[in-house]
Amino acid sequence: MPYFDAASSAPLHPVARQALQASLDEGWADPARLYREGRRARLLLDAAREAAAEAVGCRPDELVFTSSGTRAIHSGIAGAMAGRRRVGRHLVVSAVEHSAVLHAAEGLPVTEVPVGRAGAVTPDAFDAALREDTALACLQSANHEVGTQQPVAEVAEACRAAGVPLLVDAAQSLPWGRVDGAWSLLTASAHKWGGPAGVGLLVVRKGVRFAPQGPADERESGRAAGFENIPAIVAAAASLRAVRDGAEAEAGRLRALVDRIRVRVPELIPDVEVVGDPVRRLPHLVTFSCLYVDGETVLHELDRAGFSVSSGSSCTSSTLTPSHVLRAMGVLSGGNVRVSLPVGTAEEDVDRFLDVLPGVVAGVRRRLGAPDSAEPSAEAPSLVVDALGKRCPIPVIELAKVIGNVPVGGTVTVLADDEAARLDIPAWCEMRGQEYVGERPAPRGSAYVVRRTG
Amino acid sequence: MPYFDAASSAPLHPVARQALQASLDEGWADPARLYREGRRARLLLDAAREAAAEAVGCRPDELVFTSSGTRAIHSGIAGAMAGRRRVGRHLVVSAVEHSAVLHAAEGLPVTEVPVGRAGAVTPDAFDAALREDTALACLQSANHEVGTQQPVAEVAEACRAAGVPLLVDAAQSLPWGRVDGAWSLLTASAHKWGGPAGVGLLVVRKGVRFAPQGPADERESGRAAGFENIPAIVAAAASLRAVRDGAEAEAGRLRALVDRIRVRVPELIPDVEVVGDPVRRLPHLVTFSCLYVDGETVLHELDRAGFSVSSGSSCTSSTLTPSHVLRAMGVLSGGNVRVSLPVGTAEEDVDRFLDVLPGVVAGVRRRLGAPDSAEPSAEAPSLVVDALGKRCPIPVIELAKVIGNVPVGGTVTVLADDEAARLDIPAWCEMRGQEYVGERPAPRGSAYVVRRTG
């Protein structure tokens, strides 16, 4: 039963399990105490900090363990912003940061640096967003939904030149290697690399102004309140080291499997777009969007077939708004599937996934009454499609069904009130080579105008 | 090698270990995901929440898991205060709350309700502190340093009558039983009952206004940010249930062992005060203060003899100010020893501790040149002792050495600049039946005046 959602959470690494079990007996006491149980706990904590710092490429006293990656991001942003409050309150982030970063930015004057269609910022655009009153900039090392790597080293250089600290969310990339460049703060999360839940990393380089927020607490240099979870910390550090030991070989192997998916999916399935940068990307992650299906149904069918994958689709259960990452990239949000392979994924499992996927997508399309990809033929000069009250992917399906009924040069106007249509209709035009004319307000929802060009 | 510091952290309970290991394979995935690994994780999380809620005596949807007891306190106070921000910003706490509560109160208008010499507030005094603009009141169920139980049910009733929510820090008492009374919020910490580190409980009763603070995060009803640590949560809930199953019998057994310490220590060692309420107290915890020794040296010698205990003494390493709990009680802070017995403590270990302790205390006193308890004989009508620059317990030792050199009715003035003297000199007078006249400023430090009465 292959699990292909390592980007959400990875199964516990065998080394993490061993280290956890071994340290349950030695690491339960308070490391601030001077008796032998406390001293033993302190030794374990110190050794874990050294191992984690070595993997990150920082000094041990620059690294603290937090209770999660989310907490590391929240505390890192709050502390760095407060440390620079005399400079200002302005924050610069990429438009495709993790929601933990974007939520931490709420209520602040923030500039979101746009990304290209592959999901990356350009160093110039990032540089241009830095202002006199910018307290902090945040850029992920690689995107969690599409795998695109960001130009961190170049952006860090621009930030350094502007005197602005850069916080790098390295949650997705840290298992694969250190983050290069002159970044100021770095965050990560152990359960993304096969460590246990409950452990995040927050690194603050020496010389970076940092004022921890929230009630005072002496643990972890005052930067992470609460009793240290030492067995989990030991397991996190040990498994990071173990994952890194095999990272180069495993990255090459998984990259080849992902390339197979990137090539084969568009060959096997019509009307699919593979999104994210094809070269500058995480080795284990690939995302594609299928026209005329909803992501949740595809996920459900794949689960029934034994495959656990994720979706940034607007149609997944936890949220009804389209993924902010896909929206920022301007790619189709409907029918989105993210495959992220855990370390050790078998080649046969990927091949079996490629066997199963086309039938799953075709089945969903059939049930939704999606058009086949046959050439359209003209009937009327312009048409209006009423998709009001219909949810993604129906508006796009209705559009696709009738585009062949207008002549080249004619238009189809889609009336829709599902938020996803605003993203998916232009994305469909881009994929199908039709012209997206624009959107105008309608008595209910919006009217989206598409001109047939071929 | 007996470990007698359960109030800091308890060794992992066998049930916690089993539950943790069993759920490492099932509980690592994201419980928000719909595929089978996610559904399994969700089932474990739901079951743990039900078990923990049953132990607390609340509804499952009133309880969230946080990353620590400290975090539960910080989030609980912040959320409850924000939920009542229209009422005001005033906070009422007892003077002997855990530092996590007191730190969360910093910067707010706060009333600290004083405690008696046994460490408990009175419901009347607590009630009198409630104001029109009181947003929240906080009272621990039992004190972590001296074991005294607080009159939570009566205080909760007073708070209810005043329309003020009451947050109960139940970290020390929850393993022993539910907290009675109409409290509004409750917090606890799993590693105090033999659960793993990294799990706290925050309970918010239905109908209590609560506005979570910090960046938005959908996990745990928006009240505890970050990926859920499900194996640890499962282990926490399972071990709480297991500890509760045997709680009544074990409480009786440990209470008898603690009574033995309470009776024997003052018989075995001169100039010792057992502090905390002798009846309304935690079953497993006892604290005493020894004149003329410093806590850190006693702890070190006990550690060498194989006993791990704690101290709220001003002389312990992590802090140079006297314990705020002992200060609020007005008892001696020097030479303080806290014994908190873990579940299963062997009777022989307690007896061996009682064998070893007198020699340890006598040895430390000898090295510090403390007086023996012989009757004093008069020499001069009044004396001044210069203890400037000398650290606890030296000022008290110097006082004790010369009190016999003045006649009954005569005075000794101690010049001291160690903060602990302000607490320890009056406490010494109380213990030795001498009259504490008062304190006045001196060119350096303070002058403490003591009149010999016997």
Image (cartoon, coloured by chain):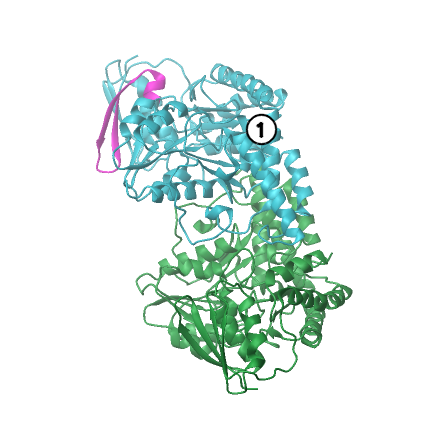
Chain colours: A green, B cyan
Q: Does A73 appear above or below A445?
A: above
Q: Does A7 appear above or below B225?
A: below
Residue that badge 1 annotates: B342
Point 34% across, 72% down: residue: A131
**From this viewpoint, is residue B98 visible?**
yes
Quarter of the picture holding the N terminus of chain B = top right
- Asked if the magenta segment contains residue A256, the reply would be no
Q: Does A223 appear above or below A109?
A: above
**From this viewpoint, is residue A6 visible?**
no
Q: Does A303 appear above or below A87?
A: above
Residue A11 placement (x, y as % from top left): 67, 54
Point 26% across, 13% down: residue: B408
Q: Quadrant of residue B390?
A: top left
Pick whichever, A170 or A209, lies toward us: A170
**Magenta span covers which residues?**
B428-450
| Chain assignment, label 1 | B
**Left or right: where does residue A363 sit relative to residue B381?**
right
Q: Amino acid at mark 1?
A: Pro
Point 37% across, 38% down: residue: B102
Pick whichever, B185 or B4, lies toward us: B185
Quarter of the picture holding the C terminus of chain B = top left
